[in-house]
Image (tube, rainbow, N blue to C red):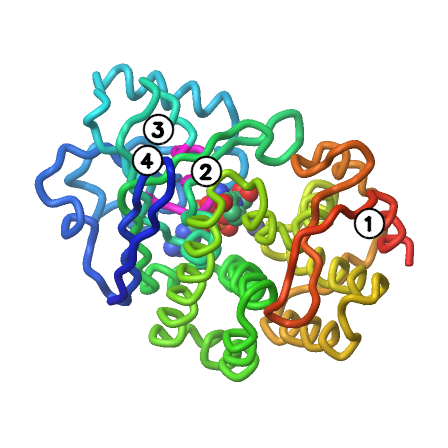
Amino acid sequence: MIESWLSAGTGSTRIVVGKSLGGMALFYPDERVTIVTDETLLGLYGAMLKPFDVIVLPSGETGKSLGHVERLYEEFCARKLTRESLVVAFGGGAVSDCVGFAAATYLRGLRLSIFATTLLAQADAAIGGKNGVNLGGYKNLVGTIRQPELCVFDVEYLLSLSEREFRGGFAEIIKHAVIADAELFSELEIRAARALERDLGTLEYLVAQSVRIKSKVVQEDENESDARRLLNFGHTIGHSVELQSGLPHGEAVAIGMVREARLCVARGTLISSDCNRIEDVIRSYGLPTDTGSSISLSAIERDKKRTGDQIQAPILRGIGLSGVVRVPLSEFVEEREA
Ligand SMILES: NC(=O)c1ccc[n+]([C@@H]2O[C@H](COP(=O)([O-])OP(=O)(O)OC[C@H]3O[C@@H](n4cnc5c(N)ncnc54)[C@H](O)[C@@H]3O)[C@@H](O)[C@H]2O)c1
Ligand SMILES: [Zn+2]
């Protein structure tokens, strides 16, 4: 078990990463907690959830809407929750984003804990306090930042994930290595087979490394005025891909990372052999490197990082070396057309 703390302006989070940590009752022994989960997880882990008061959202992105946030408010209200009440998001990134937003805004903030059950959520979405829902077909347009008080990442839950959902999570771990840690990148190259076999020790190591890198960035810049923008690597193009192709987040980000790495080669900041290594590692985790069809980048216009016709985007100077610079929108479009 690996324990760490993320301390930022909106609160401090105790983060526990481990394998076979035991059920939820161990982490929430005598609290009157309200668990929010999704239909899939209720089906898989219903027996474990039985002692708790449970609210259920639809699975996946459908749950991430203002309509479901309103329903959560009504459920919280019916239960007479107070600001001392603890809400636990039990699920992947869609659940933690939606519940995180509802918990941060109801009564201007309930206590929140995230028990993350997908690789993507354990390695990324559940860390750093960002929450939100989609609006009008655009991703995460409404949201806020507020740190939960406890995150539990037990990699044993990853054993029930579908192969596709499982692989998608590696995109965010690869992203963390590419922007900040050359050593982790080499480990990802070496450990691909063990990781894909879902060896729990390997998964625990990779999730813990992701927690370390993301926590450091968030502690430096919780509100995304500078360093936190590095975490958007692959996402400027990735969000457009996700929106239009309907591919899951991790796959869309994998494609986005390849395209944005090529953009860095075109800008002369990244050597093409490093770009090839990035593409190879993405491929070795069974993730796509292209959509096979053309993608319009109109969603970039709604990108939260846009100022006028430029975007504050992460630019790679090598593997594990990155910085944020203003990039004209046209360069993203040209990369698509290249
Ligand atoms: N807030 C952030 O900083 C941040 C960062 C990255 C991604 N995200 C968001 O996270 C979301 C994607 O996360 P995700 O892939 O975890 O999505 P998800 O929550 O939709 O989970 C994917 C699917 O896996 C199922 N599932 C979850 N745990 C399972 C388990 N243990 N066994 C079997 N099935 C399981 C879910 O029911 C769902 O159908 C996106 O909405 C993305 O925008 C947020
Ligand atoms: Zn992401």
Give whichever of discs 4 and 3 has the lower sequence position. 4
**Magenta region includes residue 104:** no
Give whichever of discs 1 and 3 has the lower sequence position. 3
Disc 4 and disc 3 in contact, CB within 8 angstroms: no
- Marks 1 and 4, how far apart in space? 38 Å
Q: Is mark 2 on a helix, strand or loop?
A: helix
- Marks 2 and 4, how far apart in space? 11 Å
Q: Does the residue labelled 3 lie within 8 Å of ligand 1?
A: no
Q: Name the residue under label 3.
A: 103
Quadrant hosting residue 240 = top right
Amino acid of disc 1: Phe
Quadrant hosting residue 298 = top right
Q: Is residue 314 above or below residue 205?
A: above
- Marks 1 and 2, how far apart in space? 27 Å
Query: Which callout, 2 or 4, points to the residue nearer the camera?
Result: 2
Disc 2 and disc 4 in contact, CB within 8 angstroms: no
On the picture, is 140 further left or further right than 273? left
Q: Is mark 2 within 8 Å of ligand 1?
A: yes
Quadrant hosting residue 279 = bottom right
Stretch of the chain drawn in magenta: 90-100
Q: Mark 1 points at which residue?
A: 332
Q: Which of 266 and 254 is in front in this view?
A: 266
Amino acid of disc 4: Val
Give whichever of discs 1 and 4 has the lower sequence position. 4
Local crowd size for mark 4, using a 10 Å CA cut-off: few (<14), some (14–19), many (≥20): many
Chief secondary structure of the magenta span?
helix
Give whichever of discs 1 and 2 has the lower sequence position. 2
Quarter of the N terminus within the rendering: bottom left
**Magenta region includes residue 96:** yes
Amino acid of disc 3: Ala
Q: Residue 97 carries which label?
A: 2
Where is residue 153 shown, x and y percent of the image?
33, 57
